[in-house]
Amino acid sequence: MALPVSGALVTFLVTLLVGGLAIYVGARVVAGIDDYSRAVVTALLGAVGWAIVSWLPVVGSVVALVVWVGVLKWRYPGGWLTVATMGLIAWVAALGILFVLNSVLGVGTGAFGVPGV
């Protein structure tokens, strides 16, 4: 007998996998790292870090972005500029992935673990 899976859990998993794919693309392009599972864990950790500090008034979004890039720096080799570039490429990749999923396939999802997408 299969256990019922809630729509919220499926949505969370799909958006996490999309965020992980975007980070994977950024890591592959910038650092040459070919590890999708590492990217998915990074997306999860980055989203948790973002959620913890983004509620701060006035500076919350800026601090949250620094925390998110800090998670990338912790998980991947390179300096701040390298991982910031990786994050920018991940953000652009997330936009492209979501364009395909949302407009072409009509899925209507987001990218968990990639800020602002």
Image (cartoon, rainbow, N blue to C red):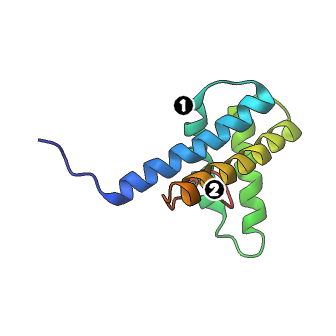
Residue position for label 1: 37
Between 21 and 101, the one lying in front of the other is 101
Percent across and percent down for residue 24 are: 65, 35
Indicate which disc residue 99 carries. 2
Which residue sits at x=69%, y=70%? 56
Percent across and percent down for residue 111 are: 58, 53
In the rendered structure, the answer to whether residue 6 lies left or right of residue 106 reads: left
Q: Amino acid at mark 2?
A: Phe
Among numbered discs 1 and 2, the one appearing first in the sequence:
1
Q: Amino acid at mark 1?
A: Ser
Which residue sits at x=79%, y=48%? 88
Residue 95, relative to residue 83: is it above or below? below
Residue farthest right in this picture: 81
Q: CA distance from mark 1 to mark 2?
A: 23 Å
Between 24 and 106, the one lying in front of the other is 106
Which residue sits at x=68%, y=54%? 95
In the rendered structure, the answer to whether residue 60 lies left or right of residue 47 reads: right
Q: How many marks?
A: 2
> Where, quadrant-wise, is the C terminus in this rendering?
bottom right
> Where, quadrant-wise, is the N terminus in this rendering?
top left
Residue depth check, mark 1 versus mark 2: number of the one nearer the observer = 2
Q: Residues within 10 Å of mark 1 (few under 14, many from 20)?
A: few
Which residue sits at x=71%, y=40%? 72
Indicate which disc residue 110 carries. none
In the rendered structure, the answer to whether residue 64 lies left or right of residue 42 reads: right
**Please, what secondary structure does the residue beneath circle 2 have?**
helix
